[in-house]
Image: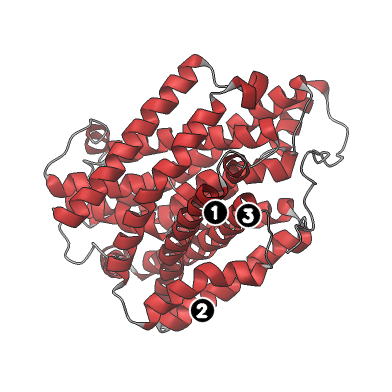
Amino acid sequence: MAVTQPAGRAPEGKAERPAAGPPMVPGRKVKARMFRLFGPAFVAAVAYVDPGNVAANLTAGSRYGYMLVWVLVLANAMAVLVQYLSAKLGIATGRSLPQMLAARLRPWARYVYFGQAEVIAIATDLAEVIGGALALYLLFGLPLLLGGLITGIVSLGVLMIQTRRGQRSFELVITGMLVIITVGFVSGLAISPVNPAEMLAGLAPRFQCVDSVLLAASMLGATVMPHAVYLHSSLTRDRHGHVSDPAKRRHLIRATRWDVLCALVVAGSVNIAMLVLAAANLRGVDGTDSIEGAHQAITQYLGPTVGVVFAIGLLFSGLASTSVGSYAGAEIIYGFLGRRPPVLVVRAVTLVPALIVLAFAVPPSWALVISQVILSFGIPFAIIPLVWLTGRRQVMGDAVNARLTQTAAWATTALIVALNLALIYLTIWA
């Protein structure tokens, strides 16, 4: 199969030129140009507010109140660093993380690496399609299988925007969906009292029991997503290309740093809002360990309007995240195999397993847990080589990680891997 470049993308190795705009006063010119470079991180940030996050955050708040707020704050801080390194790799090298790995692996190892990354993409899509199907069931009473099929078809349409209208259009659509997701999951706080003192107390790291450790590891696994790590380097590569001029590269990296920070502050705030909403209103309520049970409790305690808005947020969470997940799956195939299959094939590869799970009436909550465990296996394969590559001057040039950044990155990697190993162990044997 020939390697083709999707419509709307700048060829690798060439940067897109910023769109022309009206004249600006000198003091605002740099800021405005930097703002126009935003976008890739907001696409990647959708992975941090997917249905897996919804289930984990609501369960944490309803079981333990504000106690695990610190987990989300820590996870989001680690995610900022990881996503920044991924984005920087794409800018500095003009290649994605899968491409960089493929160039360094023996053929058999490259196929093994591709296999585990594609399994991760399938597990990711499982959670996202289930989330979209649950939302359609909650809103319209549709059977889960039909809801999953509709979610897949709509996400295919979103992917077609990227291939036909270009990446910038895709970024704008996904960012618009992120706004709807934010409103859907945060709106309940407008009529719900939050205890500021207890929320601040939740910033102190602590656990209550083995179950709280398991839940914390699950929250982390739902936050730092392997497919988002692979994808972000592709997003910046396709948006900016490889920039050889050191001054322009430094400007791009500085803009990317702010892009990542702003996007993940939004995503982190949404996650924290879900947890404190459950802590303030659903603590001790039976059935809130599932999305459908949490929705029922939200409707009962906060009113049907909030319940509908929450379900709409869940729907767009599923639609946006499954579109981004499919995009990541396509980039994994292209990076490791050098082939860019048709969009329909990419969509089918990850959608069909999710539809099979729904067809066999597998309990959605159990399927979400299993998907998080599978994702935990894939975390080290994405993060360890990312930190190693961005710390090598031969790869990054003058964009190589500073010593403090590299130390923080290895510490973050060790903590993420340890917590995900704990999740696997506790899920299987606890």
Query: Cα distance, mark 3 to mark 2?
Result: 28 Å
Residue that numbered label 2 is attached to: 149
| Residue type of the residue flagged with mark 2 | Leu
Q: Residues within 10 Å of mark 3 (few under 14, many from 20)?
A: some
Amino acid, disc 1? Leu
Q: Position of residue 341 (x, y in %)?
A: 67, 65
Report whether residue 283 is seen. no
Foreground tag (3 vs 2): 3
Q: Position of residue 368 (x, y in %)?
A: 33, 63
Q: How is the image coloured?
A: secondary structure
Q: Nearer the viewer, residue 264 or 400?
A: 400
18 left or right of 170 in image: right
Q: Nearer the viewer, mark 1 or mark 2?
A: 2
Res 287 → quadrant? bottom left
As helix, strand or loop, the secondary structure at mark 3 comes to helix
Q: Amino acid at mark 3?
A: Leu
How far across and how far down the image is residue 407, in percent? 42, 20
Q: Identify which residue, 284 or 418, lies in the foreground.
A: 418
Q: Which residue is mark 1?
A: 178
Helix or strand or loop: what does disc 2 sit on?
helix
Please tell me how crowded label 1 is: few (under 14), some (14-19), or many (20+) other residues with Cα within 10 Å. many
Residue in the image at 61% along x and 58% along y? 330
In the displayed structure image, the side of residue 369 where residue 330 appears, left or right? right
Q: Residue at x 43, y 76 (%)?
A: 139
- Where is mark 3, residue-wise? 337
Camera-side mark, 1 or 3: 3
Q: Residue at x 29, y 36 (%)?
A: 70
Which residue is situated farthest in the top direction here? 403
